[in-house]
Image (tube, rainbow, N blue to C red):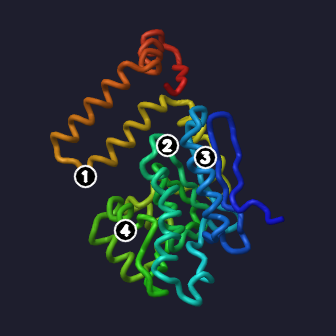
Amino acid sequence: MQNDAVEREERGALTILRLCRPEKMNALTEQLKHELGQHVPAFFQNPDARCLVITGSGGAFCAGGDLATLRDGQSPAETRARMERSHLWAKYLLSGTKPVITAVNGAAAGAGFGLALMGDIILASEDAYFLPGFSAVGVAADLALTMTLSRAVGTPRAKDILLSNRKIKAREALEMGMISRMLPSESLMSEAIALGEKLAAGPTLALGLTKDLVNQSFDLPLDAYLAREIAAQVETFASADCIEGVDAFFSKRPPQFQGR
């Protein structure tokens, strides 16, 4: 029997997903993608799960797609079906209303680069690096990397990175705003877990709606965006967490949010 390609760990309201194919640098094999397709929706559909951390095992975060599947070519129908299956879980990470942290512990290449940038907060170890890889094998970038990278660093810089297939080390990634924080390798996971537990104990509804407002700020006309902002405040002002947060503020005590 094959071992799990994705290990799930639960620490209260925090869920950790660890890609576990270190012998393949955690490449996105069909099994690994299938298991992400199970674990990611399950996290977002579980009302008791309030923050997600995704990381890799061994010395890599994720080396991207499994190129062995392309050696004999792929029909358009096969490619479309594969991409649609991946998009089912990718959409949850990009637009699901719970915070997602990616802890990039090493190489993030190809679709692994795309997966890394799906984090709402992207932590990277000092020895992590990011490499598009797509043009080297004659394919277009995928897993929403053209969108997330452009939003993070701007269109001209994103085109430079993607078209020239330029390797970006963690320090440069931090300086250009591509990642949130760079951390020592030995403390990456402890910091990711501490941050994840903080977010998991936070006002989940408010955090999720804030994530949504940031995402929509790129796409909606001003009036539609402001209407969405009103709707978010209508929902959060009436929430149990808002009542608790305000009471805690005036009582000069830490809030005890329940995520609703």
Q: Viewer-nearest of labels 3 and 4? A: 4
Residue type, label 2: Pro
Q: Which one is earlier in the sequence, the residue at label 2 or at label 1?
A: 2
Q: CA distance from mark 1 to mark 4?
A: 15 Å
* 154 sits left or right of 70 in the view: left
Report the quarter where the N terminus lies. Answer: bottom right
187 w.r.t. 64: above or below? above
Please, what secondary structure does the residue beneath circle 4 have? helix
Examine the image and state in which quarter residue 237 appears: top left
The amino acid type of the residue labelled 4 equals Thr
Alpha-carbon span between mark 2 and mark 3? 16 Å
Residue at screen point 60% across, 77% down:
66
Q: Nearer the viewer, mark 2 or mark 1?
A: 1
How many C-alpha atoms fall within 10 Å of the one at disc 4: few (<14), some, or many (≥20)? some
Q: Which residue is mark 3?
A: 191
Instruction: Please tell me which of labels 3 and 1 falls first in the chain.
Output: 3
Query: What amino acid is at disc 1?
Result: Asp
Say which mark, if any, is on residue 219: 1
Residue drawn at x 46%, y 21% as measured from the top left = 241
Q: Which of label 3 and label 1 is nearer to you?
A: 1
Mark found first going from the N terminus, 3 or 4: 4
The residue beneath circle 2 is: 99
Q: For the image shown, how many numbered marks are present on the structure? A: 4
Q: Amino acid at mark 3?
A: Glu
Q: Is residue 102 above or below residue 251?
A: below
- Which percent across, then down, holds residue 161? 38, 75
Q: Which residue is mark 4?
A: 146
Q: Position of residue 202 (x, y in %)?
A: 51, 30
Q: Residues within 10 Å of mark 2 (few under 14, many from 20)?
A: many
